Amino acid sequence: MKPGGIFVTIRVMRKILLALAFAAAATSARAVQPNPFSGFEQNVQSNYLKPFALDLGGLLGSSVVDTGRTYGFPGFWVGGDAVLQTRPNSNDLILRDANVHSFALPMVQAGVGLPFQTDVIVHGVGAYGLTIVGGGLRKSLYHTGLVDSFLPNVSVSVFGDKVNAGPFNASHGAANATAMWNLPIIKPFVEAGYDLTKVSVGAAADKQVIGTSATATGSRLAAGIDLTPFPFFDLRLALLENHGIPGGQLGLGVAF
Protein backbone atom coordinates (compact mmCIF):
# COMPACT_ATOMS: atom_id res chain seq x y z
CA MET A 1 0.00 0.00 0.00
CA LYS A 2 1.27 3.48 -0.85
CA PRO A 3 2.01 5.91 2.05
CA GLY A 4 -0.95 8.08 1.09
CA GLY A 5 -3.28 5.08 1.30
CA ILE A 6 -1.95 4.16 4.74
CA PHE A 7 -2.62 7.65 6.07
CA VAL A 8 -6.16 7.61 4.65
CA THR A 9 -6.81 4.24 6.32
CA ILE A 10 -5.53 5.53 9.65
CA ARG A 11 -7.72 8.63 9.44
CA VAL A 12 -10.80 6.51 8.65
CA MET A 13 -10.09 4.13 11.55
CA ARG A 14 -9.54 7.04 13.94
CA LYS A 15 -12.83 8.64 12.83
CA ILE A 16 -14.68 5.37 13.42
CA LEU A 17 -13.19 4.83 16.89
CA LEU A 18 -13.86 8.42 17.98
CA ALA A 19 -17.49 8.24 16.86
CA LEU A 20 -17.94 4.91 18.66
CA ALA A 21 -16.37 6.27 21.83
CA PHE A 22 -18.79 9.21 21.90
CA ALA A 23 -21.76 6.95 21.16
CA ALA A 24 -20.84 4.47 23.89
CA ALA A 25 -20.15 7.14 26.52
CA ALA A 26 -23.21 9.30 25.89
CA THR A 27 -26.16 9.11 28.27
CA SER A 28 -28.47 10.07 25.42
CA ALA A 29 -28.07 8.85 21.86
CA ARG A 30 -29.51 12.15 20.61
CA ALA A 31 -26.52 13.93 22.16
CA VAL A 32 -24.23 12.11 19.73
CA GLN A 33 -26.04 12.40 16.43
CA PRO A 34 -29.38 13.63 15.09
CA ASN A 35 -32.06 10.98 14.69
CA PRO A 36 -30.99 9.14 11.50
CA PHE A 37 -34.50 7.74 11.07
CA SER A 38 -36.36 11.07 11.31
CA GLY A 39 -36.78 11.27 7.52
CA PHE A 40 -38.37 7.84 7.13
CA GLU A 41 -41.99 8.99 7.01
CA GLN A 42 -41.26 11.74 4.51
CA ASN A 43 -38.89 9.83 2.21
CA VAL A 44 -40.17 6.25 2.20
CA GLN A 45 -41.26 4.70 -1.09
CA SER A 46 -41.97 1.03 -1.67
CA ASN A 47 -38.80 0.51 -3.71
CA TYR A 48 -36.70 2.21 -0.99
CA LEU A 49 -37.70 -0.25 1.74
CA LYS A 50 -35.35 -3.13 0.91
CA PRO A 51 -32.13 -1.04 0.94
CA PHE A 52 -33.25 0.56 4.21
CA ALA A 53 -33.90 -2.89 5.72
CA LEU A 54 -30.41 -3.95 4.62
CA ASP A 55 -28.78 -1.06 6.48
CA LEU A 56 -30.94 -1.49 9.57
CA GLY A 57 -30.27 -5.23 9.69
CA GLY A 58 -26.53 -4.74 9.36
CA LEU A 59 -26.53 -2.33 12.29
CA LEU A 60 -28.62 -4.66 14.45
CA GLY A 61 -26.48 -7.66 13.53
CA SER A 62 -23.26 -5.78 14.31
CA SER A 63 -24.51 -5.06 17.82
CA VAL A 64 -24.17 -8.76 18.72
CA VAL A 65 -20.57 -9.11 17.50
CA ASP A 66 -18.67 -10.83 20.32
CA THR A 67 -15.74 -13.15 20.91
CA GLY A 68 -16.03 -16.86 20.25
CA ARG A 69 -15.52 -17.97 23.85
CA THR A 70 -18.65 -18.60 25.92
CA TYR A 71 -18.91 -17.18 29.42
CA GLY A 72 -18.91 -20.53 31.20
CA PHE A 73 -21.25 -21.49 34.05
CA PRO A 74 -21.98 -19.40 36.13
CA GLY A 75 -20.23 -16.57 34.25
CA PHE A 76 -21.87 -13.39 33.00
CA TRP A 77 -21.29 -10.23 30.95
CA VAL A 78 -23.17 -6.97 31.56
CA GLY A 79 -22.48 -3.75 29.72
CA GLY A 80 -23.13 -1.83 26.54
CA ASP A 81 -21.84 -1.38 23.06
CA ALA A 82 -22.13 1.03 20.16
CA VAL A 83 -21.96 0.12 16.49
CA LEU A 84 -21.29 2.46 13.62
CA GLN A 85 -21.79 2.26 9.86
CA THR A 86 -19.81 4.87 7.95
CA ARG A 87 -22.48 5.52 5.31
CA PRO A 88 -25.83 4.22 4.06
CA ASN A 89 -25.68 1.86 1.10
CA SER A 90 -25.96 3.55 -2.28
CA ASN A 91 -29.62 2.56 -2.78
CA ASP A 92 -30.84 3.55 0.68
CA LEU A 93 -32.53 6.80 -0.38
CA ILE A 94 -34.57 6.93 2.83
CA LEU A 95 -31.39 7.75 4.75
CA ARG A 96 -29.49 9.46 1.93
CA ASP A 97 -32.35 11.85 1.10
CA ALA A 98 -32.44 12.76 4.81
CA ASN A 99 -28.76 13.75 4.53
CA VAL A 100 -27.64 10.90 6.81
CA HIS A 101 -23.94 10.09 6.59
CA SER A 102 -22.38 7.83 9.23
CA PHE A 103 -24.89 6.57 11.81
CA ALA A 104 -24.49 4.73 15.10
CA LEU A 105 -26.69 2.67 17.42
CA PRO A 106 -26.06 2.06 21.14
CA MET A 107 -27.21 -1.14 22.85
CA VAL A 108 -27.39 -2.40 26.44
CA GLN A 109 -26.59 -6.10 26.77
CA ALA A 110 -26.53 -8.79 29.45
CA GLY A 111 -25.56 -12.42 29.09
CA VAL A 112 -25.23 -15.40 31.43
CA GLY A 113 -23.36 -18.67 30.99
CA LEU A 114 -25.28 -21.93 31.30
CA PRO A 115 -24.09 -25.53 31.49
CA PHE A 116 -22.89 -27.27 28.32
CA GLN A 117 -20.98 -24.16 27.13
CA THR A 118 -24.11 -22.25 26.20
CA ASP A 119 -24.87 -18.56 26.76
CA VAL A 120 -28.22 -16.77 26.92
CA ILE A 121 -28.05 -13.09 25.94
CA VAL A 122 -30.63 -10.29 26.03
CA HIS A 123 -30.21 -6.75 24.77
CA GLY A 124 -32.17 -3.67 23.91
CA VAL A 125 -32.32 0.12 23.75
CA GLY A 126 -34.70 3.03 23.44
CA ALA A 127 -33.22 5.65 21.11
CA TYR A 128 -34.23 7.82 18.13
CA GLY A 129 -37.89 7.03 18.75
CA LEU A 130 -37.16 3.29 18.40
CA THR A 131 -37.62 0.58 20.98
CA ILE A 132 -35.42 -2.44 20.30
CA VAL A 133 -35.74 -5.67 22.28
CA GLY A 134 -33.94 -8.87 21.41
CA GLY A 135 -31.80 -11.76 22.48
CA GLY A 136 -30.28 -15.04 21.48
CA LEU A 137 -28.20 -18.10 22.22
CA ARG A 138 -24.50 -18.75 21.77
CA LYS A 139 -23.12 -22.31 21.70
CA SER A 140 -19.45 -23.26 21.92
CA LEU A 141 -18.28 -25.77 19.31
CA TYR A 142 -14.68 -25.84 20.54
CA HIS A 143 -13.47 -24.53 23.91
CA THR A 144 -9.71 -24.49 24.45
CA GLY A 145 -7.83 -25.26 27.65
CA LEU A 146 -4.24 -24.90 28.83
CA VAL A 147 -2.77 -27.49 26.47
CA ASP A 148 -4.44 -26.33 23.25
CA SER A 149 -4.60 -22.57 23.96
CA PHE A 150 -2.90 -21.85 20.62
CA LEU A 151 -6.07 -23.06 18.84
CA PRO A 152 -9.11 -20.80 18.40
CA ASN A 153 -12.29 -21.04 20.44
CA VAL A 154 -15.17 -21.50 18.01
CA SER A 155 -18.83 -20.74 18.62
CA VAL A 156 -22.07 -20.20 16.73
CA SER A 157 -24.96 -17.97 17.74
CA VAL A 158 -28.47 -16.96 16.69
CA PHE A 159 -30.28 -13.75 17.62
CA GLY A 160 -33.66 -12.15 17.05
CA ASP A 161 -34.82 -8.56 17.48
CA LYS A 162 -38.06 -6.61 17.37
CA VAL A 163 -37.98 -2.92 16.46
CA ASN A 164 -41.00 -0.78 17.25
CA ALA A 165 -41.29 2.80 16.01
CA GLY A 166 -44.00 5.16 14.82
CA PRO A 167 -43.24 5.29 11.08
CA PHE A 168 -42.03 1.68 10.81
CA ASN A 169 -41.60 -1.63 12.59
CA ALA A 170 -39.01 -4.30 11.91
CA SER A 171 -38.07 -7.85 12.77
CA HIS A 172 -34.48 -9.04 12.52
CA GLY A 173 -32.75 -12.39 12.73
CA ALA A 174 -29.01 -13.06 12.74
CA ALA A 175 -26.75 -16.10 12.58
CA ASN A 176 -23.05 -15.83 13.45
CA ALA A 177 -19.91 -17.95 13.53
CA THR A 178 -16.94 -16.72 15.58
CA ALA A 179 -13.35 -17.76 16.27
CA MET A 180 -11.25 -16.26 19.09
CA TRP A 181 -7.69 -16.93 20.26
CA ASN A 182 -7.57 -16.95 24.07
CA LEU A 183 -4.26 -15.14 24.56
CA PRO A 184 -3.33 -13.30 27.78
CA ILE A 185 -4.79 -9.78 28.05
CA ILE A 186 -5.43 -9.29 24.30
CA LYS A 187 -7.71 -11.79 22.58
CA PRO A 188 -8.10 -11.42 18.79
CA PHE A 189 -11.25 -12.68 17.12
CA VAL A 190 -12.99 -12.85 13.74
CA GLU A 191 -16.68 -13.27 12.99
CA ALA A 192 -18.94 -13.86 10.01
CA GLY A 193 -22.65 -13.12 10.20
CA TYR A 194 -25.83 -13.22 8.17
CA ASP A 195 -28.89 -11.00 8.68
CA LEU A 196 -32.53 -11.34 7.66
CA THR A 197 -34.55 -8.15 8.20
CA LYS A 198 -38.17 -7.27 7.45
CA VAL A 199 -39.39 -3.65 7.62
CA SER A 200 -43.08 -2.70 7.56
CA VAL A 201 -44.40 0.83 7.01
CA GLY A 202 -46.70 2.25 9.68
CA ALA A 203 -46.81 5.89 8.59
CA ALA A 204 -45.78 7.66 5.40
CA ALA A 205 -46.33 10.92 3.55
CA ASP A 206 -47.34 8.80 0.56
CA LYS A 207 -50.42 7.05 1.97
CA GLN A 208 -50.23 4.29 -0.65
CA VAL A 209 -47.02 3.00 0.99
CA ILE A 210 -48.62 2.45 4.41
CA GLY A 211 -48.87 -1.25 5.21
CA THR A 212 -46.26 -2.34 2.68
CA SER A 213 -43.16 -4.26 3.72
CA ALA A 214 -39.88 -5.56 2.34
CA THR A 215 -37.29 -8.12 3.42
CA ALA A 216 -33.53 -7.90 2.94
CA THR A 217 -30.67 -10.29 3.56
CA GLY A 218 -27.05 -9.30 4.03
CA SER A 219 -23.71 -10.60 5.23
CA ARG A 220 -21.25 -9.21 7.78
CA LEU A 221 -17.60 -9.63 8.63
CA ALA A 222 -15.81 -8.47 11.78
CA ALA A 223 -12.26 -8.56 13.11
CA GLY A 224 -11.33 -7.24 16.52
CA ILE A 225 -9.67 -7.59 19.88
CA ASP A 226 -11.02 -8.20 23.35
CA LEU A 227 -9.02 -6.63 26.19
CA THR A 228 -8.95 -7.61 29.86
CA PRO A 229 -6.46 -5.17 31.41
CA PHE A 230 -7.62 -6.07 34.92
CA PRO A 231 -10.11 -8.54 36.47
CA PHE A 232 -13.83 -8.15 35.74
CA PHE A 233 -13.24 -5.42 33.12
CA ASP A 234 -13.85 -6.16 29.43
CA LEU A 235 -13.21 -3.85 26.47
CA ARG A 236 -13.99 -4.92 22.91
CA LEU A 237 -12.98 -3.15 19.69
CA ALA A 238 -13.88 -4.41 16.22
CA LEU A 239 -13.77 -3.23 12.65
CA LEU A 240 -16.81 -4.26 10.63
CA GLU A 241 -17.89 -4.76 7.08
CA ASN A 242 -21.66 -4.62 6.75
CA HIS A 243 -22.70 -5.75 3.26
CA GLY A 244 -19.57 -4.12 1.85
CA ILE A 245 -19.67 -0.92 3.94
CA PRO A 246 -17.06 -0.30 6.68
CA GLY A 247 -17.95 0.35 10.29
CA GLY A 248 -16.90 -0.38 13.82
CA GLN A 249 -17.98 -1.60 17.22
CA LEU A 250 -16.97 -0.57 20.75
CA GLY A 251 -18.10 -2.64 23.72
CA LEU A 252 -17.50 -2.08 27.41
CA GLY A 253 -18.69 -4.34 30.20
CA VAL A 254 -18.22 -6.17 33.47
CA ALA A 255 -17.44 -9.87 33.09
CA PHE A 256 -16.99 -12.82 35.41
Image: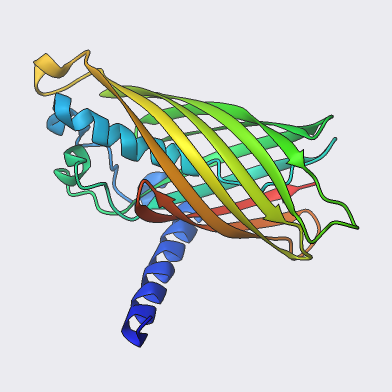
**Residue at 39 percent of width and 35 percent of height:** 57
**Residue at 62 percent of width and 53 percent of height:** 252
Nearer to us in this view, 74 or 107: 74
**Residue at 52 percent of width and 26 percent of height:** 160
Left or right: residue 69 compared with residue 239 = right
**Considering only vertical position in the picture, is 10 above or below 68?**
below
Left or right: residue 165 compared with residue 95 = right
Q: Where is residue 14 in the image (x, y as percent from the top left)?
A: 43, 70
* Residue that lies at the very extreme toward the bottom in this rendered image: 3
Q: Position of residue 69 (x, y in %)?
A: 73, 46
Asked if one can make out residue 35 in the rendered structure from this viewpoint, the answer is: yes
Give the tally of numbered discs. Answer: 0
Q: Where is residue 196 in the image (x, y as percent from the top left)?
A: 41, 29
Nearer to us in this view, 158 or 126: 158
* Residue that lies at the very extreme toward the right in this rendered image: 147
> What colouring style does the render use?
rainbow
Which quadrant of the view contains residue 29? Answer: top left
Which quadrant of the view contains residue 216? Answer: top left
**Considering only vertical position in the picture, is 146 above or below 172?**
below
Nearer to us in this view, 171 or 123: 171
Asked if one can make out residue 165 in the rendered structure from this viewpoint, the answer is: no
Left or right: residue 88 compared with residue 134 = left
Quadrant showing the N terminus: bottom left
**Residue at 36 percent of width and 86 percent of height:** 3
